[in-house]
Image (cartoon, helix red, strand yellow):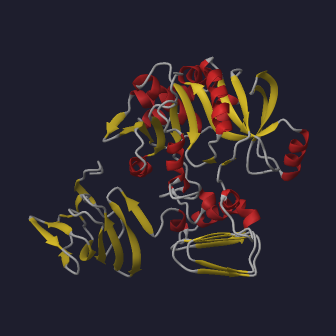
Amino acid sequence: MAERMIPVILAGGQGTRLWPMSRAARPKQFLPLTGERSLFQETLARVSDPARYGPAIIVTNADYRFLVAEQAQEVGAALAGVLLEPVARNTTAAIAAAAFHAIRTIVPDALLHVLPSDHAVMTDENYWATLEIARKAAVSGRLVTFGITPTGPETGYGYIEAGTEAAPGLCAVARFVEKPDRERAEAMLAKGGYYWNSGMFLLGARAFLEECAALSPESHAAAEAAVRDARVDLDFVRLDEAGFAGAPNISVDYAIFEKTAKVSLVPVAYSWSDLGSWDAVWKVSDKDGAGNVAWGPATLSDTRNSLIVSEKAHVAVDGMEDIAVIASEDAVYIGRLSAAQRVGPMVKALKARPETAGLTEIHRTAYRPWGGYSSVLSGQRFQVKRLFVKPGKRLSLQKHFHRSEHWVVVSGTAEVTVGETTTMLGENQSIYIPQGEVHRLANPGRILLELIEVQTGSYLGEDDIVRIADEFGRA
């Protein structure tokens, strides 16, 4: 059997170009954009064959650690480590940290298949055939990047110009090209020999770190220190902040692949998309006879080549073409589908204004390792939320300095601790938690627990929580 590859899945990005669905607290890789499973889960599924792969290493933002753990558990994926980045430092430091971790904990000559967590990829026979070409090249010491055969003059992707063929299916790299304007993209396609830069790599951990030490020594030193001084937190590995913060904020393309003499290109022709914009989502989705994609409650009339996505509100669209309507619980985006790249600048504008910044960070429904909550209504000195707690889960033992809470059980069974007293509550029963009182909520049942929470007080922010004990390591 050929040596098994170790998947390294990069899952720390925020995907703001898919706003308002993708936000800082729950970015696109954790959303189901191409089916019932999230993009992260689809990526885990692609590397699930034990004949080809060992358990995956995940590199992610510390804020996403429970999303990663929960979604991996849902699809039964074993993980070799979840590395938590204390600060964002781009892909060079992330891959270097994963390489050090693999060498230390898995195998000294680990072969890493580096994958973004938010791409849509068709794994047909061609996919596996080109992966085997890349694997053999990586075993021989090459740092392999995958180039996607372009299907049009896309301006949202970087390009790679292929050099001479070194072996069947394996080429040298002539140069990397920044995202072009349309005229230049059309010229490159007409000339031929140019491929979209996929951001996927296959490389030996030692070979990569040798090049990293030579070409980006600050990244190498920072990643080595971050892994050496990391600490284990539950099922996660917290990279040392002092070490990791010393890495430059630079992509692996700039730092390594554009400079190294060891780079090789494997051109591929399978279906691929980075799903970096709403028009990219539309392109990979099943369409009706008029070219429309509609998810959620929607009615379309005399509408063509459009994307309609709605979480709850019923959206009616009449007499439109080339339109994107994306309706989340608390925000709606409407724009030309063909100009969907403009969502990014709009998100930056929203983020710059205090009154709209929150719309780029959190959803009305926030997810936690125990379940989550939805904001229902808020006003001066009061707030109403819907809480949902998974079976067998419980919140931290906590108290609030500035608010009182009243809980009403809608469905399920609640175990509520207030001070020294523990009470079991069923449907339509309620309890009051005074300001400053130590309390805890748990779901001892087998079905989802749902409550309505009414908060009253002088300050209702989420940071008014003092955690005394917590099974998720947040106390």
In the current view of this chain or complex, which residue is farthest to the top? Answer: 140
- Closer to the camera in the image, 116 or 148: 148
Q: Is residue 236 above or below residue 30?
A: above
State left or right for residue 423 relative to residue 47.
Answer: left
- Residue 32 at x, y = what percent? 53, 58
Q: How many marks?
A: 0
Taking depth in this image into account, of 248 and 100 the one nearest to the observer is: 100
Q: Residue at x 55, y 49 (%)?
A: 13
Visible residue check, residue 248? no
- Residue 50 locus on image (x, y percent): 47, 33
Residue 435 appears left or right of 122: left
Residue 365 in view (yes/no): yes
The correct choice, above or below, for 243 with respect to 370 in the image is above
* Frontmost residue, 405 versus 451: 451
Relative height, residue 341 to residue 373 (above, below): above
Residue at 26 percent across and 58 percent down: it is 393
**Which residue appears at 51% of the width and 46% of the height?**
12
Residue 274 location (% of width, % of height): 65, 49
Quarter assignment of residue 390? bottom left
Place of residue 359 in the rendered image (x, y in percent of width and height, measured from the top left): 53, 68
Q: Quadrant of residue 257?
A: top right
Asked if residue 110 is positioned above or below residue 146 in the image, the reply reads: above
Which residue is depicted at the point 34% across and 55% down? 369
Residue at far front of view: 125
